[in-house]
Image (tube, rainbow, N blue to C red):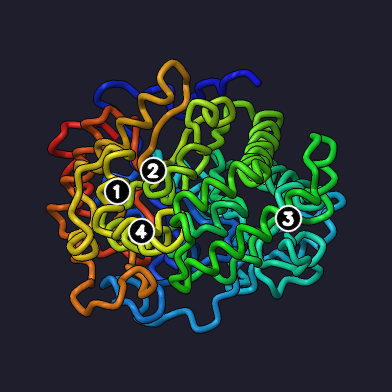
Amino acid sequence: MAAATASPLLANVGDRSKHIGIQIGAVSFLDEGIEQVLDILQERARVNVIFPAVFSYSNGTAGRQLPGHPFPGHGKTEYDSNFRGGNFSRVHPQYYKDTGIDPSLTQAPDYPDFDLLAALVPAARKRGMKTIGLVQDHFPERFPSIDKLQERDFNGQRAETVCKNNPYYRNFLAGLVEDLLRSYDVDGLMVVCEHQGAFSNTVGSRLRGKARGKPGSRTCFCQFCRQKAEKLGIRFDRVLTAFQQLEKFVNAGRWSQRPADGYYVAFWRLLLRYPELLRWEHFFHESVREVYQLMHQRVKSIRPEAMFGIHVWHNASMSPIYRAEQDFAELARFADFLKVAVYHNCGGPRIASYIDSVSQTLYGDVPPEELLQFHYRVLNYSEAPYDQVRQKGLSADYVYRESRRAMGATRGSSTLIFPGIDVDIPVREADLGSAESSKAALATRASIRDVVRHAFRAGVTGIVISRKYSEMRLESLSGVGDAVKESGLKT
């Protein structure tokens, strides 16, 4: 596939011009008013691109502040006790063909009288602001007929996630793109897919890897994956046997039952004996990339000048396995921009939770303190030691290095790099560990200004303030504006 061509949306990006985006849920506009919110975003943070969570069942990108975390000082001082999610604009069923589900049921029931894009796009455009819809790759377990789309673990049980090789799901995504692009004058779409394959998930090579269910619940091993794999010459019986053995290895590690030859040797013995493990991981990510290509092609076939972007999950800052599969040069072939999550403040607790997980599996022979230093070496970081990283988080230098890495990986392409900047992302209890002193430090206006300046220093063409406006303190947003102003940038 040819490289993604530059879009007129960002054709004016030069040495002093940046695009300052922000992710935001529909409820913020309802709670505070569209004009008032846009005023705040422009005045405080110099925002010129809005990323509304138009299709999301996740309260990480839509909804108010997460329950149990402090309110940010704007919006309603109440939590979403019954957040549902879905499509926060209007669903037009004529665009959805052979999806296995009733597309009209994806209409978000939370605010039935509010059409997010119909209200936002003209208000933003009047101010010279762009609108790029955020589409999150997730369906709830309770959705009617969702069993037709869901993944299967290697025991044949249904999973919460939906299969990227399922033709019904691919048809749904194609229809969703068609609906949003033809029904609304958006400037583009960004897809958020925070999933990896069964191999990485089984060994816990991810943030919060210890708390993600039994190893045997990993996915996907459904009929569509099996049929596709067999056409590629992958023996499905060997795949199942390989994962049965891997499950035994991981379960033993979680119970501190060290193999006779140690964890690392035993792990490599499994890989050498069952190369299907790595092949199945790659097979999964190839399927995700096919979905990206499908969405990119559909966007360009409808409106060539519209942008298509990919959110790169924060796990790429922790797991070398996941990072290896996120080849930015390859993703650049079908993306106008990459939003690379470089969440610095919550990144400390998150990377500690990753280390806690893999120190019981493939790296079980290495103490967590040494294992974190190993990862800093291979990921090219210079950060706080294991006993301090939860409290300190990751630094502005981490943001610079990751932004610079992304820029280097896409050099020669027209794909733009937008680091996702952590502005008051709540730290989940699962990331904190058992120590009472492990609470991550609250970001300050000055620290946010610093990380934004470091991202700009890496030469990026813009940023995306993350994860959602309803979590962010106004003083923190002012830190973004400070960096823009002090750098003499145009927005």
Relative side of 454 to 156, left or right: left
Q: Say which residue label 2 marks.
A: 127
Residue 263 in the image: x percent, y percent?
45, 56
Marks 2 and 3, how far apart at CA: 58 Å
Of callouts 2 and 4, which one flags the residue occurring earlier in the amino acid sequence?
2
Look at the numbered discs 1 and 3 and tell me whether their residues touch, using CB distance below 8 Å. no
- Tag nearer the camera, 1 or 3: 3
Residue 236 location in percent, x, y?
80, 48
**Callout 1 amino acid:** Gln
Q: Residues within 10 Å of mark 4 (few under 14, many from 20)?
A: many
Across the whole image, how many numbered discs are drawn on residues? 4
Q: Callout 3: 10 Å neighbours few (<14), some, many (20+)?
A: some
**What distance separates the C-alpha of mark 1 from that of mark 2?**
9 Å
Residue assigned mark 4: 355
Numbered disc in front, either 2 or 4: 4
Between the C-alphas of marks 4 and 3, the distance is 27 Å
Residue at the image point whose x is 59% and y is 29% from the top: 334
Give the CA separation, mark 2 to mark 4: 45 Å
Q: Which residue is drawn at 20% across and 48% down?
A: 383
Residue 129 seen in this snapshot = yes
Three-letter code, disc 2: Arg
Disc 2 element = loop
Q: Name the residue under label 3.
A: 241
Q: Residues within 10 Å of mark 1 (few under 14, many from 20)?
A: some
Camera-nearest residue between 42 and 482: 482
Q: Residue furthest front?
A: 260
